[in-house]
Amino acid sequence: MRLLPPILALALHAAAGFALAENISLRLGYEEGRSGLHFAPQYAERGAFGLSPDMGAEAHGEKWRVVAKDAKGNIVHQVNVRSGRDWVAESFDPHSGHITHAQKVTQRSGLFEVSLPFDARVASVEVLPQVKGNQLAATPLHRMDRNALQQLLNKSLSRKNLAASASATTVYESGPAAGRMDYVFIGDGYTAAEMSKWRSDAKKIIDGFLADPLFAANKGKINVRRVDVVSNQSGVDEIDKGIYKDTALDGEFGCYNIERLLCVNNSKTINTVASVLAPDQRDVLIVVSNSTRYGGSGGQVATLSMHASSIEVALHEIGHTAFALADEYDYGTCNSASEPSEGNVSRVSSRSVKWGSQIAANTAVPTQAGQYANGTVGVFQGGQYCRAGKYRPTENSRMRTLGYPWHAVNESLVAKVFAKYAGSTPPGGTTTSKTQSGSLSNGGIAYAPSATPGYIQSGAGTINLKLSGPANADFELALYKSGSNGWLKVASSTGPTSSETISYNAAAGYYYIEVKSYSGSGTYTLNYSYPTPK
Protein backbone atom coordinates (compact mmCIF):
# COMPACT_ATOMS: atom_id res chain seq x y z
CA MET A 1 0.00 0.00 0.00
CA ARG A 2 1.45 3.37 -0.99
CA LEU A 3 0.97 6.18 1.52
CA LEU A 4 -0.31 9.59 0.50
CA PRO A 5 1.59 12.76 1.34
CA PRO A 6 0.77 13.57 5.01
CA ILE A 7 -1.51 16.57 4.37
CA LEU A 8 -3.61 14.79 1.77
CA ALA A 9 -3.92 11.76 4.00
CA LEU A 10 -4.99 13.91 6.93
CA ALA A 11 -7.65 15.73 4.96
CA LEU A 12 -9.01 12.45 3.61
CA HIS A 13 -9.09 10.73 6.99
CA ALA A 14 -10.78 13.73 8.60
CA ALA A 15 -13.45 13.87 5.90
CA ALA A 16 -14.05 10.13 6.15
CA GLY A 17 -14.73 10.46 9.87
CA PHE A 18 -11.57 8.88 11.30
CA ALA A 19 -10.61 9.93 14.82
CA LEU A 20 -7.38 11.70 14.02
CA ALA A 21 -6.35 14.83 15.94
CA GLU A 22 -4.14 16.27 13.25
CA ASN A 23 -5.83 19.53 12.31
CA ILE A 24 -5.65 22.80 14.21
CA SER A 25 -8.28 25.55 14.39
CA LEU A 26 -6.96 29.01 15.21
CA ARG A 27 -9.00 31.97 16.43
CA LEU A 28 -7.12 35.23 15.95
CA GLY A 29 -8.13 38.67 17.12
CA TYR A 30 -7.19 41.71 15.06
CA GLU A 31 -7.17 45.43 15.73
CA GLU A 32 -6.32 48.28 13.41
CA GLY A 33 -4.34 51.08 15.06
CA ARG A 34 -2.22 53.99 13.97
CA SER A 35 0.69 51.72 13.11
CA GLY A 36 -1.42 49.22 11.15
CA LEU A 37 -3.00 45.85 11.87
CA HIS A 38 -2.10 43.93 15.01
CA PHE A 39 -3.02 40.30 15.60
CA ALA A 40 -3.50 38.55 18.93
CA PRO A 41 -3.94 34.75 19.03
CA GLN A 42 -6.90 33.98 21.27
CA TYR A 43 -7.72 30.32 21.06
CA ALA A 44 -6.67 27.07 19.40
CA GLU A 45 -7.98 23.55 19.35
CA ARG A 46 -6.80 20.34 17.77
CA GLY A 47 -9.09 17.69 16.32
CA ALA A 48 -10.39 15.65 13.41
CA PHE A 49 -12.58 18.45 12.04
CA GLY A 50 -12.49 19.53 8.40
CA LEU A 51 -10.13 22.12 6.94
CA SER A 52 -11.31 25.64 6.07
CA PRO A 53 -12.48 25.77 2.42
CA ASP A 54 -10.42 28.09 0.23
CA MET A 55 -12.31 31.22 -0.79
CA GLY A 56 -10.09 31.73 -3.84
CA ALA A 57 -7.78 34.63 -4.57
CA GLU A 58 -10.41 36.34 -6.72
CA ALA A 59 -13.41 35.88 -4.41
CA HIS A 60 -15.42 38.78 -3.04
CA GLY A 61 -14.03 41.01 -0.30
CA GLU A 62 -10.78 41.44 1.56
CA LYS A 63 -8.98 38.19 2.29
CA TRP A 64 -6.03 37.03 4.32
CA ARG A 65 -3.91 34.17 3.13
CA VAL A 66 -2.99 31.81 5.96
CA VAL A 67 0.05 29.65 5.23
CA ALA A 68 1.47 26.67 7.13
CA LYS A 69 5.19 26.13 6.46
CA ASP A 70 7.78 23.50 7.32
CA ALA A 71 11.11 24.15 9.05
CA LYS A 72 12.76 25.06 5.72
CA GLY A 73 10.08 27.61 4.83
CA ASN A 74 8.35 25.41 2.26
CA ILE A 75 4.57 25.78 2.03
CA VAL A 76 2.76 22.79 3.49
CA HIS A 77 -0.76 24.22 3.16
CA GLN A 78 -2.35 27.56 2.34
CA VAL A 79 -5.89 28.90 2.30
CA ASN A 80 -7.60 32.22 1.55
CA VAL A 81 -10.07 33.29 4.23
CA ARG A 82 -12.32 36.36 4.32
CA SER A 83 -11.20 38.93 6.84
CA GLY A 84 -14.76 40.09 7.55
CA ARG A 85 -13.51 43.64 8.13
CA ASP A 86 -15.20 45.44 5.23
CA TRP A 87 -18.89 45.12 4.45
CA VAL A 88 -21.83 47.17 3.24
CA ALA A 89 -24.38 48.17 5.87
CA GLU A 90 -27.84 48.07 4.27
CA SER A 91 -31.41 48.88 5.19
CA PHE A 92 -34.54 48.07 3.19
CA ASP A 93 -38.12 49.30 3.07
CA PRO A 94 -40.23 46.56 4.72
CA HIS A 95 -43.17 47.19 2.37
CA SER A 96 -41.53 47.49 -1.07
CA GLY A 97 -38.33 45.54 -0.40
CA HIS A 98 -36.29 48.29 -2.06
CA ILE A 99 -32.97 49.48 -0.67
CA THR A 100 -33.18 52.70 1.37
CA HIS A 101 -29.60 53.01 2.61
CA ALA A 102 -26.24 51.45 1.73
CA GLN A 103 -23.00 52.43 3.40
CA LYS A 104 -19.58 50.80 3.33
CA VAL A 105 -18.22 50.27 6.84
CA THR A 106 -14.93 48.93 8.18
CA GLN A 107 -14.73 46.95 11.38
CA ARG A 108 -11.53 48.05 13.10
CA SER A 109 -11.32 45.07 15.45
CA GLY A 110 -12.69 41.56 15.59
CA LEU A 111 -11.95 37.86 15.22
CA PHE A 112 -11.48 35.38 12.43
CA GLU A 113 -11.00 31.61 12.41
CA VAL A 114 -9.11 29.19 10.18
CA SER A 115 -8.55 25.42 10.29
CA LEU A 116 -5.26 23.99 8.97
CA PRO A 117 -3.36 20.69 8.95
CA PHE A 118 -1.10 20.27 11.98
CA ASP A 119 1.02 17.22 11.20
CA ALA A 120 4.66 16.92 12.32
CA ARG A 121 5.96 18.89 9.32
CA VAL A 122 4.20 22.13 10.26
CA ALA A 123 6.77 24.43 11.85
CA SER A 124 4.96 27.76 11.61
CA VAL A 125 1.75 29.51 10.55
CA GLU A 126 1.72 32.93 8.89
CA VAL A 127 -1.06 35.39 8.09
CA LEU A 128 -0.33 37.34 4.93
CA PRO A 129 -2.24 40.06 3.11
CA GLN A 130 -3.81 38.98 -0.16
CA VAL A 131 -1.99 40.44 -3.17
CA LYS A 132 -2.75 40.17 -6.85
CA GLY A 133 -3.29 36.69 -8.20
CA ASN A 134 -1.58 33.88 -6.33
CA GLN A 135 1.51 35.81 -5.30
CA LEU A 136 2.52 35.83 -1.65
CA ALA A 137 3.36 39.01 0.20
CA ALA A 138 6.98 39.09 1.36
CA THR A 139 6.26 40.13 4.94
CA PRO A 140 3.61 38.35 7.03
CA LEU A 141 1.14 40.34 9.10
CA HIS A 142 1.53 37.78 11.86
CA ARG A 143 3.61 34.64 12.45
CA MET A 144 3.49 31.85 15.03
CA ASP A 145 6.11 29.11 15.29
CA ARG A 146 5.23 25.61 16.46
CA ASN A 147 6.19 26.32 20.05
CA ALA A 148 3.85 29.30 20.14
CA LEU A 149 1.09 27.22 18.57
CA GLN A 150 1.56 24.46 21.14
CA GLN A 151 1.55 26.99 23.99
CA LEU A 152 -1.70 28.44 22.64
CA LEU A 153 -3.20 24.94 22.48
CA ASN A 154 -2.19 24.25 26.08
CA LYS A 155 -3.52 27.61 27.29
CA SER A 156 -6.81 27.14 25.41
CA LEU A 157 -7.28 23.64 26.82
CA SER A 158 -6.79 24.88 30.38
CA ARG A 159 -9.54 27.50 30.01
CA LYS A 160 -11.97 25.52 27.85
CA ASN A 161 -14.39 25.00 30.75
CA LEU A 162 -14.52 28.77 31.33
CA ALA A 163 -16.46 29.37 28.08
CA ALA A 164 -19.82 31.15 28.12
CA SER A 165 -22.76 29.01 29.17
CA ALA A 166 -24.47 27.91 25.97
CA SER A 167 -25.90 24.76 24.44
CA ALA A 168 -26.28 23.52 20.87
CA THR A 169 -28.99 21.47 19.15
CA THR A 170 -28.84 19.97 15.67
CA VAL A 171 -32.09 20.91 13.93
CA TYR A 172 -31.37 19.44 10.50
CA GLU A 173 -28.43 17.29 9.42
CA SER A 174 -27.79 15.91 5.94
CA GLY A 175 -24.28 14.56 6.57
CA PRO A 176 -20.91 15.02 8.29
CA ALA A 177 -19.99 18.61 9.10
CA ALA A 178 -16.68 18.33 7.22
CA GLY A 179 -18.65 17.86 4.00
CA ARG A 180 -21.52 20.29 4.52
CA MET A 181 -22.10 24.03 4.90
CA ASP A 182 -23.26 24.39 8.49
CA TYR A 183 -25.70 27.20 9.38
CA VAL A 184 -25.95 28.21 13.02
CA PHE A 185 -28.87 30.27 14.41
CA ILE A 186 -28.17 31.94 17.78
CA GLY A 187 -30.70 33.75 19.93
CA ASP A 188 -29.91 37.09 21.60
CA GLY A 189 -32.00 38.99 24.17
CA TYR A 190 -33.81 35.89 25.45
CA THR A 191 -33.80 35.46 29.23
CA ALA A 192 -33.82 32.10 31.03
CA ALA A 193 -37.61 32.39 31.32
CA GLU A 194 -37.86 32.94 27.54
CA MET A 195 -35.96 29.89 26.32
CA SER A 196 -39.15 28.19 25.16
CA LYS A 197 -40.04 31.37 23.24
CA TRP A 198 -36.58 31.33 21.66
CA ARG A 199 -36.98 27.73 20.55
CA SER A 200 -40.36 28.58 19.02
CA ASP A 201 -38.94 31.70 17.31
CA ALA A 202 -35.96 29.75 16.02
CA LYS A 203 -38.26 27.13 14.49
CA LYS A 204 -40.18 29.85 12.61
CA ILE A 205 -36.98 31.36 11.24
CA ILE A 206 -35.37 28.04 10.33
CA ASP A 207 -38.55 26.74 8.68
CA GLY A 208 -38.70 29.93 6.59
CA PHE A 209 -35.02 29.59 5.72
CA LEU A 210 -35.38 25.96 4.58
CA ALA A 211 -38.57 26.77 2.65
CA ASP A 212 -36.72 29.20 0.38
CA PRO A 213 -36.38 27.43 -3.02
CA LEU A 214 -32.60 27.85 -3.11
CA PHE A 215 -32.05 26.17 0.25
CA ALA A 216 -34.83 23.65 -0.29
CA ALA A 217 -33.04 22.51 -3.45
CA ASN A 218 -29.75 22.22 -1.56
CA LYS A 219 -30.93 20.58 1.67
CA GLY A 220 -28.58 17.67 0.99
CA LYS A 221 -25.62 20.03 1.25
CA ILE A 222 -26.35 21.82 4.50
CA ASN A 223 -26.71 21.25 8.22
CA VAL A 224 -28.65 23.56 10.54
CA ARG A 225 -27.89 24.02 14.22
CA ARG A 226 -29.41 26.12 16.99
CA VAL A 227 -27.40 27.65 19.83
CA ASP A 228 -29.18 28.66 23.03
CA VAL A 229 -27.57 31.32 25.24
CA VAL A 230 -29.26 33.14 28.11
CA SER A 231 -29.32 36.95 28.29
CA ASN A 232 -29.72 38.89 31.53
CA GLN A 233 -32.41 41.10 30.02
CA SER A 234 -35.04 40.66 27.33
CA GLY A 235 -34.91 42.57 24.04
CA VAL A 236 -32.31 44.59 22.18
CA ASP A 237 -30.64 48.00 22.43
CA GLU A 238 -32.56 50.70 20.52
CA ILE A 239 -30.15 53.60 20.49
CA ASP A 240 -32.53 56.11 18.90
CA LYS A 241 -35.07 55.49 21.68
CA GLY A 242 -32.56 55.49 24.54
CA ILE A 243 -33.31 51.83 25.32
CA TYR A 244 -30.39 49.68 26.45
CA LYS A 245 -30.52 45.99 27.38
CA ASP A 246 -27.97 43.64 28.90
CA THR A 247 -27.91 40.84 26.33
CA ALA A 248 -25.48 38.00 25.71
CA LEU A 249 -24.36 39.22 22.27
CA ASP A 250 -24.85 43.01 22.65
CA GLY A 251 -27.53 43.31 19.97
CA GLU A 252 -28.39 46.90 19.01
CA PHE A 253 -30.52 48.73 16.46
CA GLY A 254 -29.09 51.94 15.01
CA CYS A 255 -25.44 50.97 14.78
CA TYR A 256 -23.38 53.13 12.40
CA ASN A 257 -26.25 55.65 12.76
CA ILE A 258 -28.48 53.57 10.47
CA GLU A 259 -31.95 53.16 11.97
CA ARG A 260 -32.75 49.68 10.64
CA LEU A 261 -29.25 48.24 10.97
CA LEU A 262 -29.09 45.52 13.63
CA CYS A 263 -25.58 44.67 14.87
CA VAL A 264 -24.11 42.32 17.46
CA ASN A 265 -20.70 41.85 19.01
CA ASN A 266 -19.08 39.52 16.49
CA SER A 267 -16.32 38.43 18.87
CA LYS A 268 -18.81 37.44 21.57
CA THR A 269 -20.90 35.61 18.99
CA ILE A 270 -17.97 33.61 17.62
CA ASN A 271 -16.67 32.75 21.10
CA THR A 272 -20.13 31.68 22.28
CA VAL A 273 -20.77 29.43 19.30
CA ALA A 274 -17.23 28.02 19.42
CA SER A 275 -17.78 26.97 23.02
CA VAL A 276 -20.37 24.38 21.95
CA LEU A 277 -19.67 23.55 18.29
CA ALA A 278 -16.59 22.19 16.51
CA PRO A 279 -14.85 24.42 13.93
CA ASP A 280 -16.42 22.69 10.93
CA GLN A 281 -19.90 22.89 12.51
CA ARG A 282 -20.14 26.70 12.38
CA ASP A 283 -19.65 27.94 8.82
CA VAL A 284 -22.38 30.62 8.72
CA LEU A 285 -23.52 32.42 11.89
CA ILE A 286 -26.96 34.08 12.06
CA VAL A 287 -28.11 35.91 15.20
CA VAL A 288 -31.84 36.31 15.86
CA SER A 289 -32.68 39.20 18.21
CA ASN A 290 -35.71 39.08 20.50
CA SER A 291 -37.49 42.06 18.96
CA THR A 292 -40.24 42.66 16.43
CA ARG A 293 -38.60 45.84 15.16
CA TYR A 294 -37.69 45.56 11.46
CA GLY A 295 -34.05 45.20 10.50
CA GLY A 296 -30.92 43.09 10.19
CA SER A 297 -27.42 43.12 8.72
CA GLY A 298 -24.78 41.03 6.96
CA GLY A 299 -21.03 40.93 7.27
CA GLN A 300 -19.10 38.31 9.22
CA VAL A 301 -22.21 37.54 11.30
CA ALA A 302 -25.68 37.95 9.79
CA THR A 303 -28.51 39.28 11.96
CA LEU A 304 -32.30 39.55 11.87
CA SER A 305 -35.17 40.28 14.23
CA MET A 306 -38.53 38.59 14.67
CA HIS A 307 -40.31 41.12 12.43
CA ALA A 308 -42.51 39.26 9.95
CA SER A 309 -40.43 40.49 6.97
CA SER A 310 -36.99 40.04 8.51
CA ILE A 311 -36.45 36.60 6.96
CA GLU A 312 -36.19 38.36 3.59
CA VAL A 313 -33.45 40.59 5.00
CA ALA A 314 -31.66 37.50 6.32
CA LEU A 315 -31.79 35.70 2.97
CA HIS A 316 -30.33 38.73 1.19
CA GLU A 317 -27.58 39.07 3.79
CA ILE A 318 -26.78 35.34 3.61
CA GLY A 319 -26.26 35.93 -0.11
CA HIS A 320 -23.35 38.14 0.94
CA THR A 321 -22.13 36.29 4.04
CA ALA A 322 -22.24 32.72 2.72
CA PHE A 323 -22.02 33.07 -1.06
CA ALA A 324 -20.15 36.35 -1.73
CA LEU A 325 -22.88 37.66 -4.04
CA ALA A 326 -22.79 41.36 -4.92
CA ASP A 327 -25.64 43.78 -4.47
CA GLU A 328 -27.46 44.29 -7.76
CA TYR A 329 -29.19 47.56 -6.84
CA ASP A 330 -27.87 50.93 -8.08
CA TYR A 331 -28.18 52.94 -4.87
CA GLY A 332 -25.00 54.01 -3.07
CA THR A 333 -21.47 55.11 -3.90
CA CYS A 334 -20.48 53.93 -7.36
CA ASN A 335 -16.98 52.70 -8.18
CA SER A 336 -16.65 51.37 -11.71
CA ALA A 337 -12.86 51.68 -12.01
CA SER A 338 -12.25 47.93 -12.27
CA GLU A 339 -14.06 44.70 -13.05
CA PRO A 340 -15.83 43.39 -9.93
CA SER A 341 -14.61 40.09 -8.50
CA GLU A 342 -18.18 38.94 -7.78
CA GLY A 343 -19.83 36.71 -10.36
CA ASN A 344 -23.18 38.51 -10.57
CA VAL A 345 -22.04 42.03 -11.58
CA SER A 346 -19.74 43.21 -14.38
CA ARG A 347 -18.53 46.23 -16.35
CA VAL A 348 -18.91 44.20 -19.55
CA SER A 349 -22.04 44.97 -21.55
CA SER A 350 -21.65 42.35 -24.30
CA ARG A 351 -22.17 38.59 -24.56
CA SER A 352 -18.61 38.10 -23.34
CA VAL A 353 -19.84 39.03 -19.84
CA LYS A 354 -18.91 36.44 -17.22
CA TRP A 355 -22.41 34.87 -17.28
CA GLY A 356 -22.62 35.03 -21.07
CA SER A 357 -23.03 31.27 -21.48
CA GLN A 358 -26.40 31.54 -19.70
CA ILE A 359 -27.84 34.17 -22.06
CA ALA A 360 -30.23 32.82 -24.70
CA ALA A 361 -29.45 33.59 -28.35
CA ASN A 362 -32.74 35.46 -28.79
CA THR A 363 -32.16 37.79 -25.81
CA ALA A 364 -30.91 41.24 -26.80
CA VAL A 365 -27.65 42.45 -25.22
CA PRO A 366 -27.52 44.94 -23.55
CA THR A 367 -30.97 44.05 -22.24
CA GLN A 368 -33.70 46.60 -21.63
CA ALA A 369 -35.78 46.36 -18.46
CA GLY A 370 -39.44 45.53 -19.05
CA GLN A 371 -38.83 43.75 -22.36
CA TYR A 372 -38.57 40.20 -21.00
CA ALA A 373 -40.07 38.13 -18.22
CA ASN A 374 -38.26 38.71 -14.94
CA GLY A 375 -35.62 36.02 -14.47
CA THR A 376 -34.53 36.15 -18.11
CA VAL A 377 -30.75 36.21 -18.13
CA GLY A 378 -29.29 39.16 -20.03
CA VAL A 379 -27.10 42.19 -19.39
CA PHE A 380 -29.15 44.83 -17.54
CA GLN A 381 -27.69 48.24 -16.79
CA GLY A 382 -27.23 49.17 -13.14
CA GLY A 383 -25.72 47.20 -10.30
CA GLN A 384 -23.38 47.26 -7.31
CA TYR A 385 -24.28 50.87 -6.40
CA CYS A 386 -23.87 52.19 -9.99
CA ARG A 387 -26.69 53.47 -12.20
CA ALA A 388 -24.40 53.19 -15.22
CA GLY A 389 -21.09 51.48 -15.94
CA LYS A 390 -22.00 48.19 -14.24
CA TYR A 391 -24.43 45.47 -15.26
CA ARG A 392 -26.44 42.72 -13.57
CA PRO A 393 -27.73 39.41 -15.03
CA THR A 394 -31.49 39.75 -14.45
CA GLU A 395 -33.99 42.57 -14.16
CA ASN A 396 -34.77 41.93 -10.49
CA SER A 397 -33.42 39.31 -8.09
CA ARG A 398 -33.17 38.94 -4.33
CA MET A 399 -29.80 40.69 -4.47
CA ARG A 400 -31.57 43.79 -5.85
CA THR A 401 -34.99 43.81 -4.18
CA LEU A 402 -36.22 41.73 -1.25
CA GLY A 403 -38.91 39.17 -1.98
CA TYR A 404 -37.74 38.27 -5.50
CA PRO A 405 -36.21 34.91 -6.56
CA TRP A 406 -32.46 34.38 -6.68
CA HIS A 407 -32.56 33.49 -10.41
CA ALA A 408 -30.25 31.32 -12.51
CA VAL A 409 -26.91 33.17 -12.36
CA ASN A 410 -26.95 33.57 -8.60
CA GLU A 411 -28.09 29.97 -8.20
CA SER A 412 -25.13 28.73 -10.27
CA LEU A 413 -22.73 30.84 -8.20
CA VAL A 414 -24.19 29.37 -5.02
CA ALA A 415 -23.65 25.86 -6.42
CA LYS A 416 -19.94 26.63 -6.86
CA VAL A 417 -19.66 27.66 -3.22
CA PHE A 418 -21.38 24.48 -2.05
CA ALA A 419 -18.93 22.49 -4.18
CA LYS A 420 -16.05 23.77 -2.00
CA TYR A 421 -17.38 21.59 0.79
CA ALA A 422 -16.18 18.04 0.31
CA GLY A 423 -19.49 16.30 0.84
CA SER A 424 -21.62 18.58 -1.29
CA THR A 425 -23.15 17.29 -4.48
CA PRO A 426 -21.92 19.09 -7.60
CA PRO A 427 -24.58 20.05 -10.14
CA GLY A 428 -25.02 18.16 -13.37
CA GLY A 429 -27.08 15.02 -12.82
CA THR A 430 -26.08 11.63 -11.46
CA THR A 431 -22.50 11.53 -12.80
CA THR A 432 -19.64 13.93 -12.19
CA SER A 433 -16.94 14.11 -14.88
CA LYS A 434 -13.53 15.75 -14.54
CA THR A 435 -10.27 16.12 -16.46
CA GLN A 436 -6.77 16.60 -15.05
CA SER A 437 -3.62 17.22 -17.08
CA GLY A 438 -0.01 17.34 -15.95
CA SER A 439 3.47 16.00 -16.58
CA LEU A 440 5.52 13.18 -15.09
CA SER A 441 9.26 12.71 -14.86
CA ASN A 442 10.74 9.21 -15.16
CA GLY A 443 9.50 7.36 -12.06
CA GLY A 444 7.33 10.29 -11.00
CA ILE A 445 3.89 10.12 -9.39
CA ALA A 446 0.86 12.41 -9.56
CA TYR A 447 -2.42 12.27 -7.68
CA ALA A 448 -5.93 13.17 -8.74
CA PRO A 449 -7.71 15.28 -7.90
CA SER A 450 -4.68 17.53 -7.46
CA ALA A 451 -6.76 20.34 -5.95
CA THR A 452 -7.73 20.53 -2.28
CA PRO A 453 -9.03 18.38 -0.63
CA GLY A 454 -7.28 15.77 -2.81
CA TYR A 455 -10.02 13.16 -3.01
CA ILE A 456 -13.50 12.57 -4.38
CA GLN A 457 -16.65 11.45 -2.64
CA SER A 458 -18.40 8.95 -4.89
CA GLY A 459 -21.83 7.47 -4.74
CA ALA A 460 -22.39 3.79 -5.40
CA GLY A 461 -21.88 2.81 -9.05
CA THR A 462 -19.18 2.76 -11.70
CA ILE A 463 -16.04 4.88 -11.50
CA ASN A 464 -14.44 5.25 -14.95
CA LEU A 465 -10.82 6.32 -15.46
CA LYS A 466 -9.05 6.93 -18.77
CA LEU A 467 -5.35 7.89 -18.97
CA SER A 468 -3.46 8.96 -22.09
CA GLY A 469 0.21 9.91 -22.37
CA PRO A 470 3.22 9.95 -24.73
CA ALA A 471 3.86 7.02 -27.09
CA ASN A 472 7.35 6.31 -25.79
CA ALA A 473 6.43 6.06 -22.10
CA ASP A 474 4.85 3.47 -19.78
CA PHE A 475 2.44 5.07 -17.31
CA GLU A 476 0.36 3.17 -14.75
CA LEU A 477 -3.01 3.94 -13.23
CA ALA A 478 -4.45 2.99 -9.82
CA LEU A 479 -7.55 3.74 -7.77
CA TYR A 480 -7.50 3.89 -3.94
CA LYS A 481 -10.39 3.76 -1.49
CA SER A 482 -10.55 4.89 2.13
CA GLY A 483 -11.44 2.15 4.59
CA SER A 484 -11.21 1.32 8.28
CA ASN A 485 -7.58 0.22 7.85
CA GLY A 486 -6.47 3.21 5.81
CA TRP A 487 -6.13 3.63 2.06
CA LEU A 488 -6.24 0.48 -0.07
CA LYS A 489 -5.65 0.01 -3.78
CA VAL A 490 -8.91 -1.35 -5.20
CA ALA A 491 -8.15 -1.30 -8.94
CA SER A 492 -5.17 -0.80 -11.26
CA SER A 493 -4.18 -0.84 -14.92
CA THR A 494 -0.50 -1.57 -15.69
CA GLY A 495 -0.22 -2.24 -19.42
CA PRO A 496 3.02 -1.61 -21.38
CA THR A 497 1.92 1.79 -22.74
CA SER A 498 0.84 5.13 -21.29
CA SER A 499 -2.81 4.56 -22.24
CA GLU A 500 -4.68 2.92 -19.36
CA THR A 501 -8.34 2.52 -18.40
CA ILE A 502 -10.20 1.39 -15.29
CA SER A 503 -13.90 0.71 -14.87
CA TYR A 504 -14.58 -0.05 -11.21
CA ASN A 505 -17.90 -0.99 -9.59
CA ALA A 506 -17.63 1.23 -6.52
CA ALA A 507 -19.32 1.31 -3.16
CA ALA A 508 -20.12 4.79 -1.90
CA GLY A 509 -17.06 6.33 -0.24
CA TYR A 510 -13.90 8.39 -0.61
CA TYR A 511 -11.40 7.74 -3.43
CA TYR A 512 -8.26 9.14 -5.02
CA ILE A 513 -6.33 8.26 -8.17
CA GLU A 514 -2.61 7.64 -8.66
CA VAL A 515 -0.83 8.19 -11.99
CA LYS A 516 2.71 6.77 -12.01
CA SER A 517 5.54 6.64 -14.54
CA TYR A 518 6.96 3.12 -14.72
CA SER A 519 9.33 4.35 -17.41
CA GLY A 520 9.65 7.46 -19.52
CA SER A 521 8.36 10.98 -19.04
CA GLY A 522 5.97 13.47 -20.58
CA THR A 523 2.52 15.00 -20.29
CA TYR A 524 -0.61 13.07 -19.44
CA THR A 525 -4.36 13.63 -19.52
CA LEU A 526 -6.65 11.86 -17.08
CA ASN A 527 -10.42 11.79 -17.62
CA TYR A 528 -12.48 10.38 -14.79
CA SER A 529 -16.14 10.17 -13.85
CA TYR A 530 -17.98 8.87 -10.81
CA PRO A 531 -21.53 8.67 -9.46
CA THR A 532 -22.56 11.92 -7.83
CA PRO A 533 -23.28 11.18 -4.16
CA LYS A 534 -26.88 11.56 -3.07
Image (tube, grey):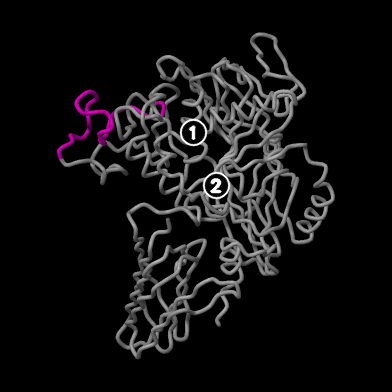
Instruction: Give the amino acid at mark 1.
Output: Phe
Q: Which residue is drawn at the image coordinates 47% and 70% (left, top)?
A: 512
Q: What secondary structure is marked by label 2?
A: strand
Seen as rendered, the residue at the extreme top is: 241
Residue 381 in magenta stretch: yes
Residue depicted at 55% across the width and 24% down the height: 296
Is residue 497 placed above or below 210 in the rendered structure?
A: below
Residue 84 in percent (x, y) is at: 59, 38
The residue lying at 71 percent from left, 32 percent from top is 229
Decide whether the magenta segment is chiefly helix, strand or loop. loop
Marks 2 and 1: which is nearer the front?
2
The reply, left or right, for residue 493 in relation to residue 10 is left
**Considering the image in quadrants, where does the N terminus appear?**
bottom right
**Is residue 380 left or right of 77 when viewed as pictured?**
left
| Residue 508 on image: x %, y % | 46, 65
In the image, the segment drawn in magenta is 362-385
> On residue 209, which mark appears?
1
Above or below: residue 77 compared with residue 332? below
3D distance between C-alphas at marks 2 and 1: 14 Å
